[in-house]
Image (cartoon, grey):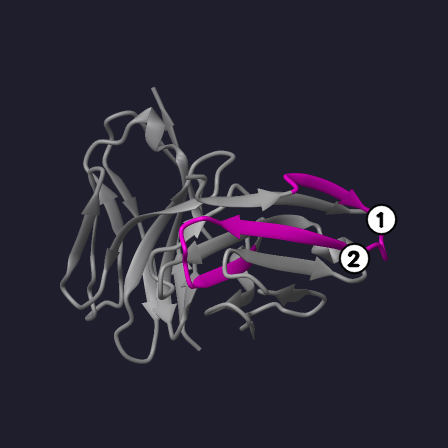
Amino acid sequence: NAGVTQTPKFRVLKTGQSMTLLCAQDMNHEYMYWYRQDPGMGLRLIHYSVGEGTTAKGEVPDGYNVSRLKKQNFLLGLESAAPSQTSVYFCASSVSGPETQYFGPGTRLLVL
Amino acid sequence: GDSVTQMEGPVTLSEEAFLTINCTYTATGYPSLFWYVQYPGEGLQLLLKATKADDKGSNKGFEATYRKETTSFHLEKGSVQVSDSAVYFCALRWTDKLIFGTGTRLQVFP
């Protein structure tokens, strides 16, 4: 039982490049979330999903897209990376509501 | 909109000292309240929660009481350990999301 895993752990991008971050959970959870964590800003919600095939915008969705084609996976895409997207990205999942979320170990992204 | 305000850190304590980390919230209604903890190099994990006024959440020696009169949910521990060094996040539930505070770093020295 791996819980929530994130791929990759660390990535360096150049401005304008694209990439996809993968989040996978093996707990059969309905809800999944993508956050970014920046110094002094805490955690800010980017996008979330309340079930397979559904997605919704969070607090800071601009510049990101997501997809939830399979229940266990939640992908976060950056179409054209910008230095302002340098951050640590966390994925989380929960059974049927937002209260008890299980977080992955994070992906550190550096955009030059 | 709904929000959470935490005391700024870092909080620096000696082992066995008493800990308080302040958290206040602004919300319409009475949301569920949470404390999450992030140990170095890891993701967040739920520490405790309270779902209604006057509820006390507790776990691993930590406690927090939901005070609607003061709109607060302060985290306390009677005797901290070096292993408690981490970042602590207060959060509230708003519809199908959690709203997190900015986090408070706790450093405990032997």
Q: Nearer the viewer, residue B6 or A10?
A: A10
Q: Amino acid at mark 1?
A: Lys
- Say which residue label 2 marks: A81
User: Residue A29, position in %: x, y?
Assistant: 41, 58
What is the distance, in whole Å, between disc 1 and disc 2 at their CAs?
Answer: 7 Å
Crowd around label 2: few <14 · some 14–19 · many ≥20 (10 Å): many
Q: In the rendered view, does B60 fall on the left or right side of B42?
A: left
Point out the stretch of residues depicted in magenta. A8-35
User: Residue A103, position in %: x, y?
Assistant: 46, 48
Label 1 resides on the chain identified as A
For image coordinates 37% across by 60% down, the residue present is B91
For image coordinates 59% across by 65% down, the residue present is A69
User: Which numbered disc flags the more N-terminal residue, 1 or 2?
Assistant: 1
Asked if residue A110 can be seen in this view, the reply is: yes
Query: Mark number for residue A14?
Result: 1
For image coordinates 43% across by 46% down, the residue present is B44
Q: Indicate whether B28 appears above or below B79.
A: below
Q: Nearer the viewer, residue B43 or A53?
A: A53
The answer to whether mark 1 and mark 2 are in CB contact below 8 A is: yes
User: Residue B55, position in %: x, y?
Assistant: 15, 61
Q: Is residue A26 magenta?
A: yes
Q: In the rendered view, does A63 fall on the left or right side of A100?
A: right
* Kind of element beneath mark 1: loop
Q: Give the residue at the far front of this rendering.
A: A70
